[in-house]
Amino acid sequence: MPETHTLGERGRGFVRFLQTLDARRVAVGALSVGLAQACLDEALIRAKAQQQFGRSISAGL
């Protein structure tokens, strides 16, 4: 491959890949926690609004 097509230092591509992967794991973890929190919040809103046998289905929570 021509040297002009090389990004970064030759022979360091795999190390750079692993560094990028580590940073992405943290971001994906944070995104997942935020999404789970939003799902829980929405489920609680819906449970409080849902009535069964004359009372909210979230009454025992």
Image (cartoon, helix red, strand yellow):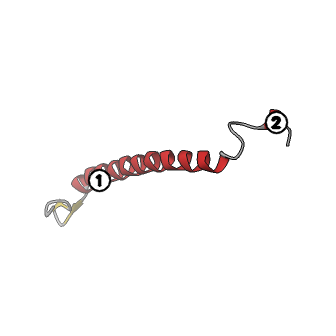
Quarter occupied by the C terminus: bottom left
How many other residues sit within 10 Å of disc 1, few (<14), some (14-19) or many (≥20)? some
Q: Amino acid at mark 2?
A: Glu
Q: How far is mark 1 from mark 2, CA to CA?
A: 59 Å
Asked whether disc 1 touches disc 2, contact meaning CB atoms under 8 Å apart, the reply is no
Q: Is residue 51 left or right of residue 27?
A: left
Q: Is residue 21 left or right of residue 27?
A: right
Residue positioned 36% across, 46% down in the render: 34
Q: Which mark is residue 18?
A: none
The location of residue 4, given as percent across then percent down, is 81, 32
Which residue is identified by label 2?
A: 3
Residue positioned 46% across, 49% down in the render: 28
Q: Amino acid at mark 1?
A: Arg
Element carrying mark 2: helix
Task: Work out which residue is located at the far bottom of the displayed protein and give it.
Answer: 53
Residue positioned 20% across, 62% down in the render: 57
Residue positioned 29% across, 49% down in the render: 41
Element carrying mark 1: helix
How many other residues sit within 10 Å of disc 2, few (<14), some (14-19) or many (≥20)? few
The location of residue 24, given as percent across then percent down, is 50, 46
Q: From the viewer's side, name the closer residue of 53 and 11.
A: 11
The location of residue 29, given as percent across then percent down, is 41, 51
Task: Work out which residue is located at the far right of the displayed protein and give it.
Answer: 2
Question: From the viewer's perspective, is the residue at label 1 or at label 2 nearer?
Answer: 2
Which residue is identified by label 1?
A: 46
